[in-house]
Image (tube, rainbow, N blue to C red):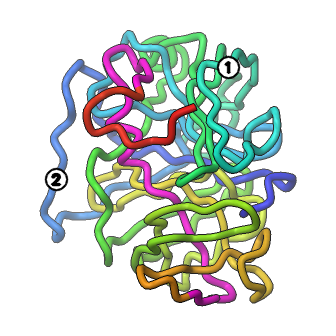
Amino acid sequence: MKRPFVGAFAAVALTGATALAGASPAVAQNAAAPAVTVSYAGTVALSNCSGSLVRMPGSVAADRALVLTNGHCLSTGMPAPGEVVVDQPSSRTFTLLDASARRLGTLRATKVAYATMTDTDVTLYQLNTSYAAIRSSYGVDPLTVSADHPVQGTAIKVVSGYWKQTWSCSIDGFVPQLKEGDWTWKDSVRYTSTCDTIGGTSGSPVIDTSTGLLVAVNNTGNEDGERCTVDNPCEVDANGNVTVHQGTNYAEETYLLTRCFGAGTKLDLTLPGCTLPRP
C-alpha cells in the first residue's frame, strides 16, 4: 500500500462541478465526450494521507458531508483482515484546498461512517457540516462518486493534494484478487504505466476525465518486485494463478459505496445491492 507516513493522495474536484440539487446529476456516457477540467478543488490533506470531499449520486445540499480516503489511512490504525469499522466517533481534521492547491480552511469529522481493508481499502468520514455550508464558506463542491463500474481503457487522472502533482493514464484492467500482506482486495483497478504513483499517495481519488466522476481510490503499488508482501501486492487471477508486476500501481473501485448509502448520506449496509463487508 502507498505508505501514509509521507502523506497520501488528494482528491480532485472539477471546474464547473454539478451543484447539489437533490437529484442524481446526468452522466455523460459517450466515450468521445470532451475531457473535463480536473483541479485540486475539494482536495483535503490529512495528517498522514490525503482524501477528497465526496457526495453520493443522490446526496443533497443539506446532507452532512463525507470525506473519502483509504482504510489504511484510518487514524486509529489499519483495520485487521475481516475488521469493519462503522459509526466510530472521530474528531479528525482535514485541510480543504482550492483549485490551485491553496489552503481554504479546516473541516472536522464527527465519526468514521465506514472503514475496512477487507475486499476493498476505504474510509469514509462524516463531517460536522453540510455540503451547502462548505459551498457557502469556501466555494467548493464535492466530487460525485460514480454509481457505475469503471471501464477498461478509460482515461483517468490521479491528483495529489499533498504533493501537488497529477498523474494521467488509463485503466489497464481489473484484478480479481489483489493480495498484499494479510489483506486481499477484490476487483481492483490496474493503471497503465504513466500513473507511476509514489509512496504516500494513499487516498487519492481516481477521476474519469470524460465525466469528472470519481471511479476509484488510489491505494497501492508493487515497489520492489516481491510477491504478496506489504508494499508489494501480487495479482491472483480467476484460476488462482499469481503474478507480480513490479512498478505497477492500483486503486480500489468506489461504485460499491453508492449502493450502501441512503438518504442523508446515511450508511445502510442492508440496502439491496449493498455488498460491502459488514461488521
The residue where tag 2 is placed is: 28
Using the rendered view, name the quadrant where residue 231 is placed. Answer: bottom right
Q: Is residue 55 left or right of residue 68?
A: left
- Range of magenta residues: 242-268
Local crowd size for mark 1, using a 10 Å CA cut-off: few (<14), some (14–19), many (≥20): few
Residue 70 appears in view: no
Residue ID at (32%, 71%): 154
Q: Quadrant of the C terminus?
A: top right
Residue ID at (72%, 63%): 1
Residue 130: x and y, percent? 48, 13
Residue 134: x and y, percent? 51, 18
Residue 156: x and y, percent? 41, 66
Badge 1 marks a residue whose secondary structure is: strand
Local crowd size for mark 2, using a 10 Å CA cut-off: few (<14), some (14–19), many (≥20): few
Q: Earlier in the sequence, mark 1 or mark 2?
A: 2
Residue ID at (25%, 32%): 272
Badge 2 marks a residue whose secondary structure is: loop
Compared with 259, 9 (above or below) is below
Q: Say which amino acid is labelled 2.
A: Ala
Cα distance in 3D space between marks 1 and 2: 36 Å
The residue where tag 1 is placed is: 88
Q: How many marks?
A: 2
Q: Is residue 256 left or right of residue 48?
A: left
Give yes or no for residue 250 being in the magenta stretch: yes
Residue 207: x and y, percent? 42, 57
Using the rendered view, name the quadrant where residue 178 is placed. Answer: bottom right
Give yes or no for residue 181 being in the magenta stretch: no
Q: Say which amino acid is labelled 1.
A: Gln
Q: Is residue 159 left or right of residue 146?
A: right
In the depicted view, which residue is nearer to us: 197 or 244?
Answer: 244
For residue 44, which numbered disc appears in the image? none
